[in-house]
Amino acid sequence: MTKHLPNGVKQDSPATMPPTPTYPHPMRVLSVLSLKGGVGKTSVTLGLASAAHASGLRTLVIDLDPQANSTVVLDPQRVQFTSNDVLADGRSGIMEQAIVRSGWGDNISLVASERALEHRAVPEGDGNVRLRVTMQGLEGYDLILIDTPPALGELTRNALTASDQGLVVTEPSLFALQGAQQALDAMSIIRDTNLRLQVAGIVVNRVRPTSSEHRYRMAELALAYGDMLWQPPLPDRAVLQQAAGACTPVHAWRTQAGREVARIFDTYLELVLAAQVEPKPLRPVS
Ligand SMILES: Nc1ncnc2c1ncn2[C@@H]1O[C@H](COP(=O)(O)OP(=O)(O)OP(=O)(O)O)[C@@H](O)[C@H]1O
Ligand SMILES: [Mg+2]
């Protein structure tokens, strides 16, 4: 069987090729964001990529964080251009040229990041559309995931302007409510110009049900956000660190904790795919 890879190359499928997805759906772009650093944006992005990989979905991860954590874990072989180069160039459709195959396999591609992205000033005056313009004409993917930096600044706003869905990640801590609310507020501002943007939901990460503080914060979040909280919450599991450290999808970890976390990300992926998105490719914002 001949398969069309995301980069347009045709390749004969070996017997080990992941299964074809069983549900038809339009390409969708999801940004993962949070106000605070270290709450699990990259882990959730990679967990979703891992679930997509296991389902055989053609997936592109755009690393828009200068820390380049997703890039490291996705382990690409040779990176020529990064998201920093793409934003510096800014031309319509230029992102295609920065896409590389990840070390996870053919169906997970990557636009890598680099430290220099930190100093990239994305012009404010352009309505945050710069990234979106560079993504024009992208096709051949079921899912595009954007990992964002730990701030709601211009990189995150560019990510949201290019997205169909925004997924907020938070921890069950004192500032969880405030952080989640600020991320939701940032999305509602972007929605003024990007009408496609929907709130995918809120993932509460690193939950320890034995902690009374966590139970209290979970109840507080449930009261404020109800159904927006994705169930089940993501528990605190070292396997997420182990999988990232080994540059592998968490679905490759056949331990009890690995299977538990993989099942949760499968559920999350279903939630992403269940949302209705406009079946049109990205177009410039007029
Ligand atoms: N559920 C979890 N259980 C255990 N460790 C976790 C969990 N989620 C994240 N971690 C670990 O916490 C650290 C921070 O997570 P991660 O890098 O995903 O956060 P982030 O929000 O992307 O951070 P940054 O804002 O710096 O980009 C990592 O070492 C990660 O492996
Ligand atoms: Mg990160």
Image (spheres, rainbow, N blue to C red):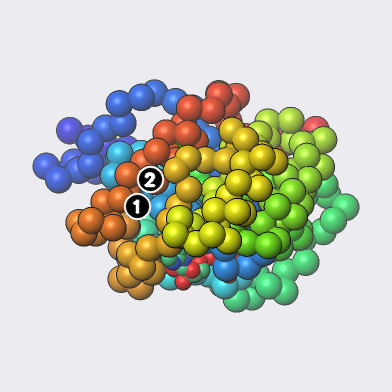
Q: Please give the name of the residue rendered at 76% of the width and 60% of the height, measured from the top-left corner.
A: 153
Q: Which mark is residue 264?
A: 2
User: Could you give the CA–CA distance between mark 2 and mark 1, rounded to whole angstroms?
Assistant: 5 Å
Q: Secondary structure at mark 2?
A: helix
Residue 51 falls left or right of residue 40: left
**Dot 2 and dot 1 residues touching (CB under 8 Å):** yes
In the image, residue 78 above or below residue 104 = below
Question: How many numbered badges does the structure rendering display?
Answer: 2
Residue that extends furthest to the front in the rendered view of this protein: 212
Q: Which residue is mark 1?
A: 261
Q: What's the residue type where badge 1 is placed?
A: Val
Q: Which mark is residue 151?
A: none
In which quadrant is the C terminus drawn? top right
Residue that extends furthest to the right in the rendered view of this protein: 125
Q: Please give the name of the residue rendered at 82% of the width and 35% of the height, measured from the top-left corner.
A: 192
Q: Secondary structure at mark 1?
A: helix
Give the image location of residue 120, x and y in percent.
72, 69
Give the image location of residue 78, x and y in percent.
39, 69
Residue that extends furthest to the left in the rendered view of this protein: 15
Q: What's the residue type where badge 2 is placed?
A: Ile
Does the closest atom of ligand 1 sit within 8 Å of the Cβ of label 2? no
Q: Quadrant of residue 102?
A: bottom left
Q: Mark 2, residues whose alpha carbon is within 10 Å: few (<14), some, or many (≥20)?
A: many
Residue 137 versus residue 170: which sits nearer the camera? 170
